[in-house]
Image (tube, rainbow, N blue to C red):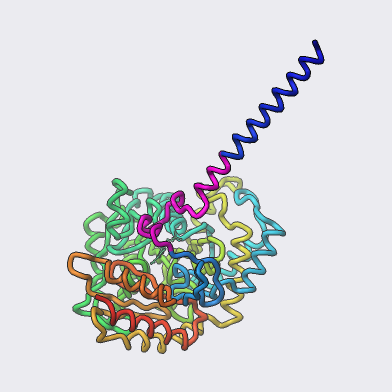
Amino acid sequence: MFILCAIFNVYFVFKFLKNKGTAMSSAAQEKTQVTANNLEAFWMPFSANRQFKKKPRMFVSAKDMHYTTDDGRKVLDATAGLWCCNVGHAHPKVVAAVSKQVQELDYAPAFQMGHPKVFELASRVATLMPGSLDHVFFTNSGSESVDTALKIALAYHNVRGQAGRTRLIGRERGYHGVGFGGISVGGLVNNRKFFGSLLTGVDHLPHTHNLKENAYSKGIPQWGAHLADDLERIVTLHGADTIAAVIVEPVAGSTGVLLPPKGYLERLREICTKHGLLLILDEVITGFGRVANTTTAAEYFGVQPDIITLAKGLTSGTIPMGAVAVDKKIYDAFMQGPENAIELFHGYTYSGHPVAAAAGLATLDVYQQEGLFERTKELAPYWEQALHSLKGLPHIIDLRNIGLIGAIEMEPIPGKPTARAFEAFLQCFEKGLLIRTTGDIIALSPPLIISKQQIDEIFGTLSTVIKGLA
Ligand code: PXG
């Protein structure tokens, strides 16, 4: 009897396992069938998902100035990925630093613990910042940098006994990432209108774009400094003692490259100082040599902000990382109270991640060793000339540039906004060139390692494509 039972038991266990095995492998099989070459699961950010998935554009590798597509074509990168890969793709020094770091110390807790590289990187970044922006808070993206900066601004006034300063002032057409803080101070309607009431107590300066006055300016336009005076109106409306900070991009990138009129940023600074408002410059795009032979646009324009937000070029896009550089007076205001008290109730699991810190240090080395910020300055006149050679081509209504940034604004097809620029994007991609479009504006921001020959190639391809557009 015992033996019979044992035999049955073994049989049932065997059957159970067999069934389980079969069930598992068929589920896995089904899953494989679903996932292999199936693009459905991934909800792509800021993309026309259905259009893309019908005709995907895939990159499988990248080196220096080029991507390679899944069908083996080389594509010249005129956008540094998304304004981030400033040292070019897969730079051997950055790749080596990241590989070494991930083996040595993959992760270290960011709260109440440290690791040497994050302190080293903070010191290096602080040294590169203008004036007394001596302290650096690390984040993982530009959006987090912006929300961190806004929170620091609010908390700063709070710890100084001015808790009534709660308003934040942004600007129309501004882009400050996609956190609730960033979209609240931002000024791009589609990024705001779907997402409820956003932060309260936010007001906006007018944008500075004016084709009638400034079309085809080379570098910064002459007209428009007075637009900064609107800040005085906003201060009068709300009362200075209700306003914490003003945030603007020194050069508005995402909205299609809007340059600050001559004297505009200086004027904003003056008004902020006069009324005790913090000035935050969002340099997520403009930081790290994009506009001149300086680390920041702030330094180039000679305007001293209280806070600078950074990301992208900090690690050349290799590992996600952002940073917020704050003035000494702000940091010091928090370093009061008992020494065992946490001074700022804010931070991320991955603030100052060791692998990102290693990527940051290696990237800063490359900028210095290869003189890449100087290269921006050297190449800027050639870049400007090449861009403005497109003047007179069909559809073009403006060309704008600064440093290694360029924009081509086209007349929209009546009733079909964005269609013309998107067609240009598709045709350029077919011809081996990656550009970026926003509305009917083509925005260009190549890695800083670009050669003159590659600049010619960008504008040669663009010229051919634009001439052929409907
Ligand atoms: N501030 C500014 C000024 C930015 O340009 C962010 C914040 C947000 O960064 P994250 O890392 O959260 O994306 C940005 C981002 C484009 C484009 O094509 C621009 C950005 C991102 C993606 C595309 O212009 N800027």
Residue reaching furthest top?
Answer: 1
Q: Is residue 279 above or below residue 449?
A: above
In the image, 6 versus 396, the foreground residue is 6
Check residue 35 for magenta coloring: yes
Q: In the rendered view of the protein, which quadrant contains the N terminus?
A: top right
Residue at left offset 40%, top offset 74%: 430
Q: In the rendered view of the protein, which quadrant contains the C terminus?
A: bottom left
| Left or right, residue 117 beside residue 174 | right
Q: Is residue 132 above or below residue 353?
A: below
Q: Quadrant location of residue 466?
A: bottom left
Question: Is any atom of residue 435 visible in this view?
Answer: yes
Q: How many numbered markers are drawn?
A: 0
Q: Quadrant location of residue 262?
A: bottom left
Residue at left offset 35%, top offset 55%: 183
In the image, 201 versus 369, the foreground residue is 369
| Left or right, residue 181 beside residue 411 | right
Q: Is residue 305 above or below residue 390?
A: above
Residue 48 location (% of width, % of height): 35, 58
In the image, 410 versus 445, the foreground residue is 410
Q: Quadrant of ligand 1?
A: bottom left
Q: Which residues are magenta?
A: 27-56
Residue at left offset 45%, top offset 63%: 309
Residue at left offset 22%, top offset 74%: 411
| Left or right, residue 197 beside residue 90 | left
Question: Is any atom of residue 397 visible in this view?
Answer: no
Q: Quadrant location of residue 224?
A: bottom left
